[in-house]
Image (spheres, rainbow, N blue to C red):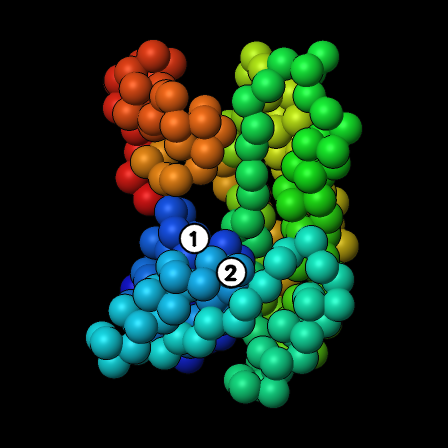
Amino acid sequence: MTGQVVGKVALVTDAASGIGRAIAELLAQEGASVIATDFDEVGGPEVVAGIAKQGLKGILLPQDVTSEPRWADVASESDQRFGRLDVLVSNAGIGLEVPTVDMSLADWRRQIAVNLDGVFLSAKYSLPLMRRNGGGSIIMMSSTAGLYGVSAMAGCCATKGGVRLFAKAIALECASVGIGVNSVHPGIVETPIHEEINGGSIGSKRLAQRVVPLGRAGQA
């Protein structure tokens, strides 16, 4: 990737921790100006402060990815601050481990709101900026749970599978204007989301020992 993002502007959602944080930091190190968005009032400022300490460029915009008015504001502020947008990493996502018959409709809808609505809105409000600049790259974070079924995680599988096909459809819409669209499918990675999925009872390391052939979790 060295050199490919120098002078580019990249927006990364859910950038306060885990994979999103690693992506934001790496993009900054490789020369991009990073717009990190998150509603984490502790982790978000830490990421941007760390980027600034290295003499790199990054700003934090507080954001709930399920809010369309906030997406409009984020797109507008990004445009005002940088005048362009070259890269979108739509990374925000959640997963709940609960059997389908025990899952509340509210929890089902919450996963749809973050994992699908948030990704849809990220594309809807980022694409006009990229089209104006004649190209760009969109990366939508799916999951291996979007490739095959996982017991007691039907909501996560349904939404992450939706992200995969949404990316394929948007890729066809955007190919003629020079915007690449891809989905990425991480497996078990050492991030806070696995502690949240399992209520803290099974961390990513123990889960990896149980289901990953090599017995170890990935690193963000």
Amino acid at pointer 1: Gly
Q: Residues within 10 Å of mark 2 (few under 14, many from 20)?
A: many
In this rendering, is residue 215 above or below 168?
above
Residue 40 at what x, y percent from top left?
47, 58
In this rendering, is residue 146 above or below 151?
below
Residue identified by numbered label 2: 38
38 or 148, which is in the foreground? 38
Q: Residues within 10 Å of mark 1 (few under 14, many from 20)?
A: many
Residue 215 at what x, y percent from top left?
26, 17
Contact? badges 2 and 1 (CB < 8 Å): yes
Q: What residue is shown at x 59% (from left), y 63% (from top)?
A: 63
Q: What residue is shown at x 38% (from left), y 59% (from top)?
A: 43
Residue 59 is tagged as: none
Residue mark closest to the camera, 2 vs 1: 2
Amino acid at pointer 2: Asp
Q: What residue is shown at x 61% (from left), y 81% (from top)?
A: 77
217 or 185, which is in the foreground? 217
Question: In 3D space, how far apart are the residues under numbered discs 2 and 1 (Cα atoms)?
Answer: 10 Å
Say whether residue 54 is left or right of residue 3: left
Query: In which quadrant of the rendered view does residue 128 lie?
Result: bottom right
The kind of secondary structure element at disc 1 is: helix
Residue 12 appears anywhere in the view: no
Q: What residue is shown at x 65% (from left), y 21% (from top)?
A: 154
Say whether residue 73 is left or right of residue 209: right
Quadrant in the picture for the C terminus: top left
Quadrant in the picture for the N terminus: bottom left
Residue identified by numbered label 1: 20
Q: Looking at the image, is mark 2 or mark 1 earlier in the sequence? A: 1
Residue 11 at what x, y percent from top left?
52, 66
The kind of secondary structure element at disc 2 is: strand
